[in-house]
Amino acid sequence: MGATIIEKIVRRNTGMEAAKAGDIVTVNVDRVMIHDIFIPFVADKFEEMGFKKLWDADKVVLIYDHLVPASQVDDTRHFRKGDEFAARYGMKNVHRSDGICHQLMTEAGYVKPGNIVFGTDSHTTTYGCVGAFSSGIGYTEMASILGTGKLWIKVPETIKVNINGKLPSNVTSKDIILRLIGDLGADGATYKALEFAGDTIENMSVASRMTMSNMAIEAGAKCALFTPDEKTAEYCEIELTDAQRSLVGDEDAVYCRTISYQAEDFVPVMACPSQVDNIKPTTVLEGTEIDQVFIGSCTNGRLEDLEAAASVLKGKKVAPFVKLIVTPASRKIYRQALANGTLKILSEAGAMITHPGCGLCCGRAGGILTDGERVVATNNRNFLGRMGTSKVEIFLASPVTAAACAAAGKIVTPEL
């Protein structure tokens, strides 16, 4: 009997050659990520559990991204607690305002194909873009890992998603994952692994795959996995091992469900207020007036996303009375976009370009909205109160669609 990607990762990690979906196993953790919101709670729980040292300080990464720059007085407590904890236990992998945690974990080389990684954020599923099993956990589980280096899990069943063909020029991987979430429903993949395959996937950049693995959690998925290839190797700056190359779902593997799409059938879509699975084509929303556009986040703040937005806005201006906020996902991306002229195009169009970080996505800073306002955003959630008051309407879209809306001052379908 063949194996799915998640089964292969778990078997190699645990040495259990017959591990399969539904089994309870204890895995050896390769890396963990803690962000600034959770570090005070992780620190307190770790010491409450009686641990005296970290299982491996080099495998722990602390990232300040949600609360920087501080927007509330209490935010500084998180920085102080985090710095104290890192110093006390010898943590060297600390990033202060270098970018969003999920961008940095792969960009900085912390995650490699075949790794098992946990983080204190639900969008830790992002690292599946390079073929790693990664998932979000709470602070109690994280404290336990810090002391033991292990965690028990149930091996997820897998939903296989096949996509073949060439995408229309105005469609991106964001439209694909939104469509999939709409088809599955917000709970349609609960505690399942999403395994992506097909020539459309093979032709995608790692950045595009990252968008899809990032949003897998919006359908309830435990993880989302892509087979490592030469693009993965180049991105991770490694040479793939035979074991990493073998992380592909076998033809005779057992899947709980298989979904197939033809790329040419995809169209630009949006997730409409206030549920991520409330998906509609932009064509039925055209003409809806907007107040703001946000391009950024761990979902769509990468260089290719900023470049795509710039290609739409080149030579144009943001519509009167519409605010366009652009937030690169990391300092590296910020510098790259600055060096190649992307930020110049966006700023000349009227964009406000902010410090790399979570910013508006988590509603802490950088352009929160008020009653009756509408925003088109490239991030991953449009829940009530996410970006301001509970009467703000959030429409999720691709960077291409978002940029077109910014220029029009209303929801439009980007041109082919």
Image (tube, rainbow, N blue to C red):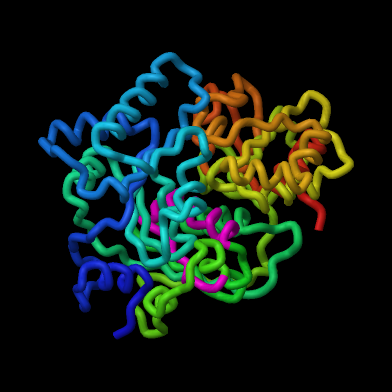
The reply to whether residue 186 is in sight is no
Tell me which residue sits at (72%, 32%) in the image. 324
Instruction: Identify the image quadrant of the N terminus.
Output: bottom left
- Residue 160 higher or lower than 253, as above or below: above
Residue 348 shown left or right of residue 264 in the figure: right
Residue at point 69% right, 71% down?
Answer: 166
Does 11 sit above or below residue 25? below
Tell me which corner region of the image, top left, top right, bottom left or bottom right, holds residue 52. Answer: top left
Q: Which residue is situated farthest in the top direction here? A: 73
Q: How far from the left and from the top, in percent, is residue 347?
A: 78, 34
Give the magenta part as a residue range. Answer: 206-230
- 402 and 392: which is toward the camera: 402
**Image vertical order of residue 7 relative to residue 181, above or below:** below
- Quadrant of the snapshot with the C terminus: bottom right
Residue 144: give x, y in percent of width and height: 19, 44
What secondary structure is the magenta-colored segment mainly? helix
Is 143 covered by the magenta stretch?
no
Question: At which x and y percent is residue 332?
Answer: 60, 45
* Residue that extends furthest to the left in the rendered view of this protein: 50
Residue 118, percent from left and from top: 33, 50
Residue at 60 percent across and 20 percent down: it is 370
Relative to 165, is 59 above or below?
A: above
Q: Is residue 214 magenta?
A: yes
Residue 129 appears left or right of 189: right
Q: Is residue 275 among the parts visible in the rendering?
A: yes
Q: Residue at x 64, y 46 (%)?
A: 397
